[in-house]
DNA sequence: GTGAAAGCGCTAACAA
DNA sequence: TTGTTAGCGCTTTCAC
């Protein structure tokens, strides 16, 4: 452990085994041209010194790698899980890797994690739809100029420091959802919003309702972005407007709560009330009836994100615009 | 781009800007003691050369980091998502990071990903319950001796090359589940197994059934480890044994499919048939009724795994045994 | 089969 | 304010 930082290095092992450092490299990496006796001696020395190779030193001499950090609040939320899955696979296409950072609910821990993540990655992909992960970044990173760490926002708020941004374009999709509801005879459609997300979904709903104000004034209620939150909001909707016959929900997780609450209150879906969520989660197939949803193509979202980062990092000759919108696609399952 | 590998280095930027490399470091890292004019010149040069700092070189001189690779087949599966979440948080406690590797269904792509991951991490956490990710590792890694990359198996098969292993201990939990079913008057209990997982769950079920063979011979059916697979198996069970009044299922994802199939066939859960899954997923709360389950404490599993790795990597003075079992805990929700 | 030298790209410490 | 020197820990030549 003769090292500056307390860890033993290849030189310590070499000294202990009475050989040169190259011999240690050969022995430990199972290369040829080492006698069995020498190899055994080296391995023993390494074991005694608790030697562990420094991956950064290895990588530096062998080549360079690209790592992007993915910052999210809770991977147990299926939206983030599907996003992370897609991003990991899209990154693998370029031989990049994804460093996962599930920050959890504790903001102080989150700050500490981000503090150390930022020096380990070449770029950061931030999710913004639930917690604004941007606000948790070390101030020094936010203060950096154009040669600071590239920051990519996935479906979250804008910020001058961002290098790129992928947004979810809701207007066309929500129009399709509302038209579908009208087509199946629903004209008293409420909207359940998230208390923490962006306002564009609710704003679009309100604007749409105003156009048909003669039939139904519209009703929107905000709740926590969870299954339970969705359930509470659904109860509030049905109590405020018992004749409501359709509900559009901010996202699928909340919509699952809506389905549960409607079931508990004895309402049939979709006969009494039709329900449409947003996100296209696989978890929307876990319910009965399955959840009709405005699906986000997470594979497209992820590969767009990776292309943007490739442009920023100079890894491609085929520049990609640094702002993109992903459209929602109405996916009819059983709930509407 | 005067570099050996094609990428420009700090020296290229220094040359282009007509300054020393140290000045480049200062300018690009927003350090003090650089004149605004110089900084601007350096930034311009960096931009023109498409300069990107090498994180490995930076880390090497600043300190060392520990990164563990998490290999899994599909993060969209909520079991893996909850596991990954827990592991990321447990790793963060020690200032380690987790490199995510969602290998997907394509085995050739998976092999290629693993090939490059192994040289980027200090240890690998493998999940074995669905795909045997061990079989996808580069042969060279498997051939390595005791100073090869540490390999930790999470709930998967044993292998001589593994450095550590966390298993799920099913016996006590399954006994508790079967006793609970008996206590609520169920005596014709079938088991739905996975075609790909380990056999211990089914074997334990069969052994338990033999002890009470007078009342019910037992029935187990295997299916694909998916929601759809669970549904098919449930239909098979009800057709083979229409008087079956309880089903224990290999895992929660399949059990969700069982609930759907029973609902579709007009059986009430839990009145007609009680259902118990295994895993304790949050997704088990998405259904109506909510899924009763033998829960795995994923936080404990993850922190055990991290402690084991700390022992192997010599990061702790408090050695942890390299084999551990996590118990299942019966969590009564609504389906039994 | 083994060792010596050179260098991966970067930053901290000290000079100028 | 800027430049020079000296490594960080490892692997790849090329000698012996």
Image (cartoon, coloured by chain):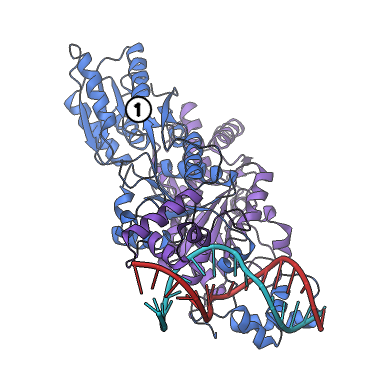
Chain colours: A purple, B blue, C red, D cyan
Q: Chain of mark 1?
A: B
Q: Is residue B102 in view? A: no
> For the point 24% across and 27% down, which residue is it?
B203
| Front-most of residues B49 and A279 | B49
SS assignment at label 1: loop
Q: In x, y percent, where is residue A176? A: 47, 56
Q: In x, y percent, where is residue B281? A: 44, 35
| Front-most of residues A207 and B335 | B335
Graded by Cα atoms within 10 Å as few (under 14), some (14 to 19) or many (20 or more), the crowding at tag 1 reads: many
Where the C terminus of chain B falls, by quadrant? Answer: top left
| Front-most of residues A229 and A61 | A61
> For the point 32% across and 50% down, which residue is it?
B134
Where the N terminus of chain B falls, by quadrant? Answer: bottom right
- Vertical side of B182 occupied by A130: above or below: below
- Vertical side of A149 occupied by B315: above or below: above
Q: Is residue A6 in view? A: yes
Residue named by callout 1: B170
In the visual, does A286 lie left or right of A214? Answer: left
């Amino acid at each position: 452990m003769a090292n500056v930082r307390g860890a033993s290095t290849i030189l310590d092992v070499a000294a202990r085994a009475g050989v040169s450092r190259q011999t240690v490299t050969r022995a430990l990496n199972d290369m040829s041209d080492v006698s069995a006796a020498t190899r055994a001696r080296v391995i023993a020395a390494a074991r005694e010194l608790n030697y562990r190779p420094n991956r950064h030193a290895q990588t530096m001499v062998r080549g360079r790698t690209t790592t992007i950090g993915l910052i999210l609040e809770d991977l147990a939320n299926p939206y983030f899980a599907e996003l992370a899955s897609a991003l990991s696979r899209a990154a693998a296409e370029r031989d990049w890797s994804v460093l996962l950072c599930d920050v959890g609910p504790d903001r102080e821990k989150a700050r500490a994690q981000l503090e150390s993540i930022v020096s380990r990655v070449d770029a950061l992909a931030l999710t913004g739809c639930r917690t604004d992960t941007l606000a948790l970044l070390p101030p020094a990173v936010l203060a950096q100029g154009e040669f600071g760490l590239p920051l990519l926002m996935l479906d979250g708020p804008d910020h001058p420091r961002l290098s790129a941004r992928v947004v979810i374009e809701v207007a066309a999709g929500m129009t399709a959802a509302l038209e579908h509801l009208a087509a199946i005879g629903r004209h008293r459609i409420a909207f359940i919003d998230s208390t923490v997300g962006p306002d564009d979904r609710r704003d679009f709903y309100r604007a749409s309702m105003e156009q048909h104000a003669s039939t139904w004034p519209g009703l929107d209620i905000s709740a926590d972005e969870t299954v339970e939150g969705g359930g509470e909001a659904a109860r509030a909707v049905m109590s405020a407007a018992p004749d409501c016959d359709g509900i559009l929900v901010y996202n699928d997780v909340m919509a699952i709560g809506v389905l549960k609450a409607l079931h508990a209150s004895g309402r049939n879906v979709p006969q009494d009330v039709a329900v449409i969520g947003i996100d296209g989660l696989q978890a929307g197939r876990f319910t009965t009836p399955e959840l009709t949803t405005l699906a986000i193509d997470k594979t497209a979202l992820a590969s767009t994100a990776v292309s943007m980062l490739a442009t920023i990092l100079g890894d491609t000759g085929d520049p990609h615009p640094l702002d993109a919108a992903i459209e929602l696609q109405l996916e009819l399952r059983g709930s509407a």
